[in-house]
Amino acid sequence: MSKRKKVIIVSVGGALVLLLAQTYFDIHRVRRTTDLQTIQSLVQQHVKIGMSPDEVIQFLDSQKLEHSPLWRPDPWISGPHNYSNLLVIHAIKRRTMESFLSYENIELMFVFNDKHELERFDIFPTVIGL
C-alpha cells in the first residue's frame, strides 16, 4: 500500500472517530439550567425565619417557582426529611439538569409552626431516571 493511501485511510479513520465522539457527547451531554447553590443563595438572601406563608408564597411567585399552598401532608417523606403532619409549602424548580437518561429537580420545603411562622427550609435535589 502506498504512503498516500495510508495517509488517506488514517485521515478518514480519524475524522470518523471524531464524528462518532461528537455524536456520542451530543446525545449524552448534561444540560444544567440552574444549580443547587444558586437556589440556596437566593433563598437565604430573601427568605427569613419567622416569615409568614404569604410572604414565602410572594417570594416563590416572584421567582416563578411552582409551589403548593400551605398544607399539612400525611404522610410525606421527600428527600432526606419526613414532613408528615407538619405545616409546609412545597416548591420545585423542574429539570434543573438534563441528560440523556435522567433529569434533576430542585425541591424546596418551607416548614411552619402552628402560629404560621417559618421555622426552617430545606433545599435538595431529586434525580429522576437512571
Image: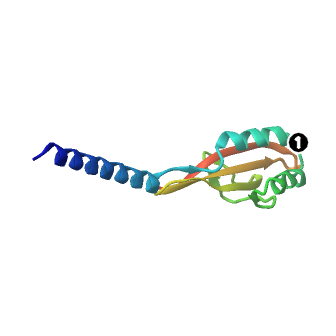
Q: Amino acid at mark 1?
A: Gly
Q: Which residue shows up at 22% across the image and 44% down it? A: 7
Q: How is the image coloured?
A: rainbow
Q: How many marks?
A: 1
Residue 130, position as x, y percentages in the image: 45, 55
User: Is 122 positioned to the left or the right of 22 in the image?
Assistant: right
Taking depth in this image into account, of 18 and 118 the one nearest to the observer is 18
- Residue at the extreme left of the image, as rendered: 1
Q: Which residue is mark 1?
A: 50
Observer-nearest of 121 and 32: 32
Quarter residue 3 falls in: top left
In the image, residue 5 lies at what x, y percent?
17, 49
- Whether residue 35 is situated above or below residue 63 in the rendered picture: above
Q: Which residue is painted at 31% across and 53% down in the image? A: 16
Element class at badge 1: loop
Query: Does residue 97 appear in the picture of this structure?
Result: yes
Looking at the picture, tell me which residue is in the foreground, 83 or 46.
Answer: 46
Residue 73 sits in quarter = bottom right
Could you classify mark 1 by the number of other residues whose Cα lies within 10 Å: few (under 14), some (14-19), or many (20 or more)?
A: some
Q: Is residue 127 above or below residue 45?
A: below
Q: Residue at x 26, y 50 (%)?
A: 13
Tell me, yes or no, if residue 130 can be seen here: no
Q: Position of residue 103 (x, y in %)?
A: 54, 55
State the image coordinates of residue 56 (x, y, percent, origin top left). Answer: 85, 51
| Left or right, 34 with reference to 69 | left
